[in-house]
Image: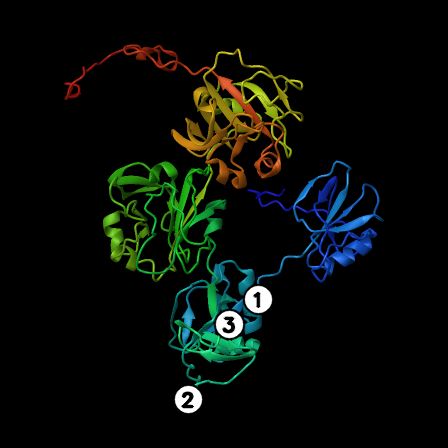
C-alpha cells in the first residue's frame, strides 16, 4: 500500500516481467471464479502455462487475473474477480499492469487578448509548440500569449484575460470531455465563422468534434446513426426520432491549491462560479452531503461529509487560486459575532493576523469567512466562505470572476506516536487486547467481556494477536485505537456493553471529534463477530476504514480497509478519575493551589477593581 509522502519520496514497485507484458505478482492469494469465455458464453476453466494464460487474459475482457497453483507456472487459469483473497493452498495470482493514460490537454484560442504576468518569471520567447510544452511543464502557467502573427510566444500566469492593444493571441490549456444525452436534440444550426449563413454540414462524429471546438457558436453536436451536425442551443429537447446529443464539458487548467503551504489538503466542498454561496446549512460542521463529488472547478456545487475526519486546519480558496486563507479548525468553529479570529496565512499575508468573522447560532448563512474584516470584505471580493445559497455582494464580487470557491481540510498538528497510543487523553491506559496488521479482526469471541486469554502478551505493535483477561479489573472506560494511533475513540464501559443493533451509542471523544457525540454500533446476541465499534456510524465506516474493533477473526472490508494500513488495532481500559467535589478545586492538576479571591453564587462578579 502506497501513502502520500510529506517529503515527496519516490517509490518503485517491482513488476514481474516475462511471459506477456508486465504483471503484479501476489503471493499466496487467489482470484475467485473462472473468467467467462471471450464470447461471454460459459466459463473458461482451461489449464494453461503462465505465458499462455497471460496472453489469453489480455485478449479477454472478462479476465481480471491469472491464478496459478503453488510453485507451478504450467498450471494456471483465467479468473474473473479483481479482488483477491488469502489462498489456503498457497496459490499465486498475477494482475495485469496497465500504464496510466497521460492527461491530454487541448488548447482554446482567444484572439485580441492577453494573459498577464510570466509564469514563475519565465519570460523566454518561444515558438507556439515549444511554448505549449513549456507551459504544461510549469505548474504556474495558465496560458500562452503570442504576438499577432503567432510566432513569438511566452508562458503566462493569469487565468483572467484582458484586451490586447497590439492584437495578441492567447491559448489556454483545457481538458474537454463530451456529455452524451440519448433521445434528445439541440435546436438550430450555428452561424459559420468568418462567412455568412449557417453550418448545416453533415459530418462523422470525430469530424464534428473538431468543427464544434473551432466554432464559438457551436454548443452541441446532434447525431442520428453515424451522421452528425453542429447545433447552437444549450437547451435540449426530446427527440421523436431518437437522436443523441453531445455537449462539450470544458475544464480549464488552474493553480493547484492542494499544494499550498506544503500540501496535504483534501477538497471537501465546492461552489461553482455564480451569484450564490454554498447550499450547505451545517455551519461548517461537515455533516452536509449533496451533489456528485467533483473537482475544484466543477460546474455544480457539491459537498462530502467530513465531520468525522481527522483534521485541524481549513483552507478556503477561490477556484482560480488567487485568493485564499488558512485557519485553525478551532478559529473557524465556535460561536462569534463580528469576532476577531486568527488567520495563519493568506494570499495577502505570510504572517498570522486576525479578521472579524461571523458564526451565529440561528443565522443559516454563517459562517462568513473572509480575508479581511467582514464589513470591508463584502464589497471588495474578500469573502471566501458563506452558506445557505446567500447572494448579494457577498457572492457577486468574488464567485463569478474567480471560478467559484473551495474548502479544503488537513491534519497538521501533533499526532500520537505509533506504539504509544496509551498516551491518548492523558494516559493511564492498560493494554489488554491486540490484533496485528492483517486481514482479520481479533480472534476473541467473548463480546469484549474480558474472559478469554490467548497468545503471549506483548506491545501495541506485536506481530501476533494476544489478549489478557480483564473481566475482574476495576475500569469504566475503553480506548479503541489503531496501532499507528491514527484512528481512536474513547467510550464508557456502559456504552460498549449491552445488546443493540445499529443503535446510537455515546463516544466521549475520538480522533475525529474532541467532544461527545453518538455513533451507530452493533452488539448482538449469538453473532460471533460483535461488537462492532467504529469512529463513525457502522456502515459508512466499513469503506472508510473507521472500524476500530471486531471479533471472531472476521475479515472482508471490515478489516482490510483499516488493519493492514494502520498497523493493527488495540484495546485499552482505565478507571476514569472521579470528578472533584465542590470546594476541593485546590486539588486540580496535582494540587498546590492557594485560594486568594472568592465571589459567591449570585448575579454579580467580584467587587475588586484592581
Image point (31%, 13%), residue name: 585
Q: Which residue is mark 2?
A: 197
| Snapshot quadrant of residue 558 | top right
Location of mark 3 (residue) = 153
Regarding mark 1 in the picture, which secondary structure is present there? helix
Q: Secondary structure at mark 2?
A: loop
Mark 1 or mark 2, which is nearer to you? 2
Q: Is residue 483 above or below residue 454?
A: below
Q: Nearer the viewer, residue 417 or 349?
A: 417
Marks 3 and 2, the one that precedes in the sequence: 3
| Tag 1–tag 3 contact (CB < 8 Å) | no
Residue 552 lies in quadrant? top right
- Residue 76: percent from the left, percent from the top? 80, 49
Ranked by sequence position, the earlier of labels 1 and 2 is: 1
Q: CA distance from mark 3 to mark 2?
A: 34 Å
Horizontal and vertical percent position of residue 151:
52, 77
Amino acid at each position: 500500500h502506497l501513502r502520500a509522502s510529506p517529503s515527496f519520496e519516490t517509490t518503485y514497485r517491482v513488476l514481474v516481467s516475462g511471459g506477456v507484458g508486465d504483471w503484479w505478482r501476489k503471493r499466496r492469494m487467489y482470484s475467485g471464479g473462472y473468467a467467462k469465455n471471450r464470447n461471454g458464453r460459459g466459463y473458461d476453466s482451461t489449464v494453461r502455462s503462465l505465458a499462455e494464460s497471460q496472453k489469453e487474459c489480455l485478449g479477454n475482457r472478462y479476465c481480471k487475473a491469472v491464478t496459478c497453483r503453488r510453485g507451478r507456472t504450467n498450471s494456471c487459469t483465467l479468473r474473473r474477480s479483481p479482488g483477491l483473497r488469502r489462498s489456503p493452498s498457497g496459490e499465486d495470482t498475477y494482475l495485469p499492469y496497465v500504464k496510466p493514460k497521460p492527461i491530454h490537454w487541448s488548447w482554446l484560442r482567444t484572439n485580441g487578448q492577453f494573459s498577464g504576468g510570466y509564469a514563475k518569471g519565465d519570460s523566454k520567447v518561444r515558438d507556439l509548440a515549444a511554448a505549449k510544452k513549456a507551459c504544461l511543464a510549469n505548474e504556474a502557467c495558465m496560458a500562452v500569449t503570442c504576438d499577432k502573427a503567432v510566432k513569438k510566444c511566452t508562458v503566462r500566469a493569469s487565468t483572467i484575460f484582458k484586451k490586447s492593444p497590439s492584437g495578441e493571441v492567447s491559448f489556454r490549456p483545457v481538458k474537454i470531455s463530451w456529455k452524451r444525452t440519448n433521445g434528445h436534440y439541440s435546436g438550430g444550426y450555428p452561424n459559420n465563422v468568418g462567412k455568412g449563413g449557417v453550418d448545416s454540414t453533415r459530418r462523422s462524429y470525430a469530424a464534428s468534434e473538431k468543427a464544434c471546438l473551432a466554432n464559438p457558436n457551436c454548443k452541441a453536436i446532434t447525431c442520428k446513426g453515424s451522421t452528425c451536425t453542429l447545433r447552437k442551443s444549450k437547451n435540449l429537447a426530446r427527440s421523436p426520432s431518437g437522436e443523441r446529443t453531445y455537449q462539450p464539458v470544458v475544464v480549464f487548467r488552474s493553480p493547484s491549491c492542494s499544494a499550498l503551504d506544503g500540501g496535504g489538503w483534501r477538497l471537501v466542498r465546492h461552489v461553482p462560479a455564480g451569484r450564490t454561496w454554498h447550499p450547505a446549512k451545517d455551519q461548517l460542521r461537515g455533516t452536509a452531503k449533496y451533489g456528485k463529488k467533483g473537482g475544484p472547478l466543477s460546474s455544480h456545487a457539491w459537498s462530502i461529509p467530513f465531520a468525522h475526519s481527522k483534521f485541524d486546519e481549513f483552507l478556503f480558496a477561490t477556484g482560480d487560486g488567487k485568493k485564499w486563507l488558512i485557519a485553525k479548525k478551532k478559529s473557524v468553529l465556535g460561536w462569534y459575532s463580528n469576532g476577531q479570529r486568527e488567520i495563519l496565512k493568506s494570499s495577502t499575508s505570510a504572517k498570522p493576523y486576525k479578521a472579524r468573522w461571523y458564526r451565529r447560532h440561528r443565522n443559516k448563512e454563517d459562517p462568513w469567512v473572509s480575508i479581511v474584516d467582514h464589513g470591508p470584505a463584502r464589497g471588495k471580493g474578500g469573502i471566501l466562505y458563506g452558506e445557505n445559497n446567500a447572494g448579494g455582494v457577498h457572492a457577486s464580487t468574488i464567485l463569478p470572476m474567480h471560478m467559484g470557491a473551495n474548502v479544503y481540510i488537513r491534519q497538521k498538528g501533533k499526532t500520537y506516536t505509533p506504539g504509544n497510543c496509551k498516551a491518548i487523553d492523558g494516559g493511564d491506559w492498560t493494554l489488554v487486547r491486540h490484533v496485528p496488521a492483517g486481514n482479520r479482526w481479533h480472534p476473541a469471541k467473548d463480546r469484549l467481556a474480558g474472559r478469554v486469554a490467548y497468545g503471549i502478551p506483548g506491545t501495541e505493535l506485536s506481530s501476533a494477536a494476544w489478549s489478557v483477561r480483564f473481566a475482574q479489573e476495576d475500569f469504566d472506560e475503553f480506548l479503541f485505537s489503531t496501532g499507528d494511533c491514527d484512528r481512536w475513540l474513547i467510550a464508557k464501559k456502559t456504552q460498549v456493553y449491552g445488546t443493540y443493533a445499529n443503535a446510537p451509542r455515546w463516544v466521549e471523544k475520538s480522533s475525529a471529534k474532541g467532544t461527545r457525540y453518538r455513533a451507530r454500533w452493533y452488539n448482538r446476541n449469538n453473532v460471533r463477530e460483535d461488537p462492532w465499534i467504529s469512529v463513525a456510524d457502522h456502515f459508512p465506516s466499513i469503506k472508510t476504514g473507521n472500524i476500530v474493533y471486531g471479533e471472531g477473526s472476521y475479515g472482508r472490508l471490515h478489516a482490510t480497509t483499516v488493519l493492514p494500513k494502520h498497523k493493527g488495532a488495540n484495546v485499552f481500559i482505565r478507571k476514569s478519575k472521579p470528578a472533584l467535589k465542590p470546594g476541593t478545586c485546590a486539588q486540580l492538576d496535582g494540587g498546590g493551589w492557594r485560594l486568594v479571591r472568592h465571589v459567591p453564587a449570585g448575579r454579580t462578579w467580584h467587587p475588586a477593581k484592581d
